[in-house]
């Protein structure tokens, strides 16, 4: 029987990172993965393929939309959708093979198969039993389906199906206007689909500050996407095409389309893990409860990533992966959850860290807020990408930063500095007094920070 210091179940950004860090710290490590490739949701059917398609589709859309204004004419521009998909696939393969390489480099055993706890220290995989002093559960999450819209990945799509289509649907209905919905909606709208969202809530992307959600909805609407908020899908007829029955107040309407993407959220993948054999409970939503050190009710069995409460984000899972490996090795890591960014890779991008204005108000924190628009930023004007703003919230007395919210070009990259500032518990003055290269988009952060307790220069 093999005996490991650490066995990780699941090789997503939580699991594979935990395995690498554990091995770096000298622990004999194995990672059990049931899929034929490593990398989990993020690398195979999540972050990476979606960002590859977002990039290609934006490239195509920008050339079509802006080429003439930028000073070049392209005749006969044609979409080669299958090539776009092949490029996405190649990108994904590069990454999943890369993780295999990292496993080899760090002498991590990849055990292929479905892992199931057999006892407090035993895991069964494909007929063999692996023994471990410490076990890390990192089995991630799966898309939630609606009972009357089971996924067939042809007409009724989960995000996984939407990343693997063979043609662009003429009309794509999207149930759920969260980040995954608006990202995939952006891809297909740019490629020519008519995209219609049906959203139960009265806003899109509810995790963001309301100003970001509203600004993003305005931009996406201007691009041609249609949003029906406060609408609930209650029935579906799939006999010919798609016919959704949708309720709003007392009214019932029908929405038809060629395909429907159900993007109503994800749930932890905690079934068939043998939790009962090890005496571990799940909560009512399927999450595995843990303490502040990622320990389940069994102190040597840990859980991280999408499997536990918190934002379902790859970088959150990875931070937890590093932290849990270091804990097992006897270190004392800590994660500052307030400094975990959240991004929508739409156009414009939305990115945020810290508290939203609604959260600040709800907590009764005295605060100041400042907003600076990209249209007053020289770099944004040079590149012709002026939509959006930077919004900063700071505590009124201590001037400590509470939250930074960006809607605009390259927001996903710009947010890195505010994340560091939040992590270092910086004040608004420290951001405002920092020198930023000119002309850069990042000068909007300085200007917004100046607007809190001094005054911005360029508006
Ligand atoms: C379309 C889409 C786009 C996304 N974009 C982003 C983004 O841009 N940025 C971001 O931060 N997040 C994004 N996410 C979310 C991100 O993918 C997840 O938060 C992240 O992958 C969670 O990591 P994890 O390690 O917890 O689990 P996962 O990545 O889900 O990995 C879990 C792994 O465990 C394996 N597994 C499960 N059960 C077993 C078992 N019993 N035995 C063996 N193996 C098992 C699974 O096969 C899987 O490989 C996106 C998700 C989707 C769907």
Image (cartoon, grey):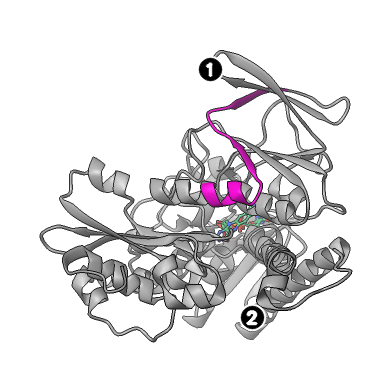
Residue 117 visible here: no
Specify whether 294 is left or right of 386: left
Residue 402: x %, y % from top left: 26, 59
Q: Residue furthest top?
A: 250
Res 137 quadrant in image: bottom right
| The disc label shown at residue 40, or none | none
Decide which of 211, 292 is in the foreground and name it: 211
* Ligand 1 rendered quadrant: bottom right
Residue at image x 58%, y 44%? 266
Residue at image x 67%, y 30%? 146
- Residue range highlighted in magenta: 218-235
Res 127 quadrant in image: bottom right
Residue at image x 34%, y 71%? 445
Residue 259 visible here: yes
In this picture, is 225 found above or below 66? above
- The residue at which mark 1 appears reads as 249
Specify whether 252 is left or right of 320: right
Decide which of 96, 26 is in the foreground and name it: 96
Q: CA distance from mark 1 to mark 2?
A: 54 Å
- The residue at which mark 2 appears reads as 102
Decide which of 403, 27 is in the foreground and name it: 403
Residue 364: x %, y % from top left: 18, 43
The nearer-to-camera label among 1 and 2 is: 1
Decide which of 96, 9 is in the foreground and name it: 96
User: Do the residues under discs 1 and 2 have CB atoms within 8 angstroms?
Assistant: no
Q: Is residue 102 magenta?
A: no
The local secondary structure at tag 1 comes to loop
Residue at image x 22%, y 80%? 433
């Amino acid at each position: 029987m093999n005996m490991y210091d650490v066995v990780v179940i699941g090789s997503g950004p939580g699991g594979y990172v935990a395995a690498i860090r554990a091995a770096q710290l000298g622990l004999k490590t194995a990672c059990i993965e049931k899929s034929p490739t490593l990398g989990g949701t993020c690398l195979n059917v999540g972050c990476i393929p979606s960002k590859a398609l977002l990039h290609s589709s934006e490239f195509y859309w920008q050339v079509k939309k802006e080429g003439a204004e930028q000073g070049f004419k392209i005749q006969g521009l044609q979409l080669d959708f299958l090539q776009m998909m092949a490029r996405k696939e190649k990108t994904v393969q590069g990454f999943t093979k890369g993780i295999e390489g990292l496993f080899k480099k760090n002498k991590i055993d990849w055990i292929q198969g479905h892992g199931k706890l057999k006892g407090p220290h035993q895991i069964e995989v494909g007929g063999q039993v692996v023994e471990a002093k410490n076990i890390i559960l990192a089995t991630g999450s799966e898309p939630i389906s609606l009972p009357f819209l089971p996924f067939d990945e042809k007409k009724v799509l989960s995000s996984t199906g939407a990343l693997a289509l063979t043609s662009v649907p003429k009309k794509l209905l999207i149930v759920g206007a969260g980040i995954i919905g608006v990202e995939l909606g952006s891809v297909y709208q740019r490629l020519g689909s008519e995209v219609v969202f049906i959203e139960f809530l009265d806003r899109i992307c509810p995790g963001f500050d309301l100003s970001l959600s509203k600004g993003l909805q305005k931009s996406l609407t201007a691009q041609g996407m249609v949003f029906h908020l406060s609408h609930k899908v209650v029935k579906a007829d799939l006999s010919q095409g798609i016919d959704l029955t949708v309720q709003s107040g007392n009214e019932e309407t029908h929405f038809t389309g060629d395909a429907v993407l159900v993007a109503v959220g994800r749930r932890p993948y905690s079934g068939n893990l043998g939790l009962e054999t090890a005496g571990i409970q799940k909560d009512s939503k399927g999450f595995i409860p843990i303490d502040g050190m990622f320990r389940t009710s069994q102190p040597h069995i840990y859980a991280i990533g999408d499997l536990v409460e918190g934002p379902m984000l790859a970088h959150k899972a990875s931070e937890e992966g590093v932290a849990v490996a270091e804990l097992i090795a006897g270190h004392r890591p800590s994660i500052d959850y307030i400094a975990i960014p959240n991004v929508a890779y739409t156009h414009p991008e939305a990115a945020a860290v810290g508290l939203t204005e609604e959260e600040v108000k709800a907590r009764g924190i005295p605060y100041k807020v400042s907003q600076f628009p990209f249209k007053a930023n020289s770099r944004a004007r040079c590149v012709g990408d002026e939509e959006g703003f930077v919004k900063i919230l700071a505590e009124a007395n201590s001037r400590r930063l509470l939250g930074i919210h960006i809607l605009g070009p390259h927001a996903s990259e710009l947010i890195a500095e505010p994340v560091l500032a939040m992590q270092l518990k910086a004040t608004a003055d420290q951001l405002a007094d920092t020198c930023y290269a000119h002309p850069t988009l990042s000068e909007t952060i300085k200007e917004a920070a100046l607007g809190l307790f001094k005054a911005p220069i360029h508006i």
